[in-house]
């Protein structure tokens, strides 16, 4: 009897070990995506449709729905690149491009908000928003702020409303309020670089250059910079880094600005300054000469000519 019980315990142990090893074997073959879906006010979204599309040639598409806690999961995914989109009518849509790998699931957080274009054109929110945009175009910033404040009271998850409210506050040079408002916009649209770029400008105006550099780095993570970007924007990011004492990062942005526009005079001057700081006099000379050629009477012309005179 005792021997029989020992064999039964052994059989249970073997069964448990078999199951335990089955899960890692599956994880080593497939990947997974899981996450949460929230609305703009931070509440879970129930029954949001989450679409997972394979991007590496073969057409594969999976759909799941979020539960009452806003959670979702899709297992059994072949490793590769996917576009994951969460959407719910009347709440909003958001997408991420992700790479699914073997083992641990790729985790995502969706915050769904409606764009201004998705709001009924005759709704009070849309009317207030449109009035605010019109006021900004006429540089009537107090009026714009009134309209955008009205719009966010009517729809607390309106990203465009908060973003443009921040722009209007910057027009008034109310930098602190603008940073607070743009932070809210960044929370509503975490993948957007625009709020971070504007916050970088606001921090620069406050001479908080380290904070400005951090905002620029956050913008770049979200595609807010690069060689194919707008030259003026890239140049401005370089100035932010320069003011924060991050010379290498500044140089990269000035070079990117010149890649986008080889005749950007100010970018040439500051690219020269970055190289002068490195002790690379030959390249600095080339940039200063180009600056003087493009802007012989520019604000840095006297400095550039003085540097060139010492390099002869």
Image (cartoon, grey):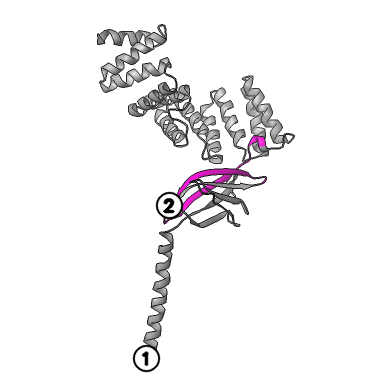
Using the image, determine if residue 14 lies above or below residue 234: below
Q: Residue at 33% of width from left, 28% of height from top?
A: 248
Residue 294 in view in this figure:
yes
Tell me the quarter of the picture where residue 8 sits.
bottom left
Is there CB contact under 8 Å for labels 1 and 2?
no
- Residue beneath disc 2: 101
**Picture quarter with the N terminus:** bottom left
Local secondary structure at mark 1: helix
Q: What residue is disc 1 on?
A: 2
Residue 99 spot, x, y in % from top left: 45, 47
Task: Please state which of the two labelled residues, at mark 1 or mark 2, is closer to the viewer.
Answer: 2
Left or right: where 201 falls relative to 157: left
Q: Please give the name of the residue rendered at 25% of the width and 11% of the height, measured from the top-left corner.
A: 311
Q: Is residue 24 above or below residue 15?
A: above
Part of the protein shown in magenta: 89-117
User: Marks 1 and 2, Cα distance to the nearest angstrom?
Assistant: 48 Å
Q: Is residue 182 above or below residue 28?
A: above
Q: Is residue 22 magenta?
A: no
Q: Earlier in the sequence, mark 1 or mark 2?
A: 1
Q: Nearer the viewer, residue 169 or 127?
A: 127
Q: Secondary structure at mark 2?
A: loop
């Amino acid at each position: 009897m005792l021997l029989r019980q020992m064999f039964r315990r052994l059989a249970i142990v073997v069964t448990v070990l078999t199951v335990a090893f089955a899960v890692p074997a599956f994880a080593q073959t497939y990947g997974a995506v899981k996450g949460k879906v929230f609305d703009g006010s931070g509440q879970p979204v129930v029954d949001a449709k989450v679409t997972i599309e394979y991007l590496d040639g073969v057409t594969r598409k999976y759909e799941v729905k979020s539960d009452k806690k806003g959670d979702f999961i899709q297992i059994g995914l072949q490793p590769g690149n996917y576009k994951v989109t969460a959407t719910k009518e009347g709440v909003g849509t958001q997408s991420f491009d992700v790479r699914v790998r073997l083992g641990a699931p790729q985790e995502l957080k969706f915050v769904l908000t409606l764009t201004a274009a998705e709001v009924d054109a005759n709704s009070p929110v849309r009317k207030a928003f449109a009035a605010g945009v019109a006021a900004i175009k006429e540089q009537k910033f107090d009026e714009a702020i009134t309209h955008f404040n009205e719009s966010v009271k009517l729809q607390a998850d309106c990203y465009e409303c908060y973003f443009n409210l921040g722009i209007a506050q910057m027009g008034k040079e109310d930098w602190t309020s603008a940073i607070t408002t743009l932070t809210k916009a960044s929370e509503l649209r975490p993948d957007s670089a625009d709020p971070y770029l504007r916050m970088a400008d606001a921090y620069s105006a406050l001479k908080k250059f380290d904070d400005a550099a951090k905002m620029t780095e956050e913008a770049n993570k979200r595609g807010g910079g690069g060689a194919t970007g707008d030259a003026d924007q890239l140049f401005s990011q370089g100035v932010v880094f320069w003011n924060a004492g991050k010379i290498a990062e500044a140089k990269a942005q000035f070079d990117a600005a010149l890649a986008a526009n080889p005749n950007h005079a100010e970018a040439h001057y500051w690219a020269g300054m970055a190289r002068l700081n490195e002790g690379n006099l030959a390249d600095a000379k080339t940039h200063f000469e180009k600056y003087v050629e493009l802007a012989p009477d520019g604000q840095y012309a006297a400095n550039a000519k003085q540097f060139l005179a010492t390099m002869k």
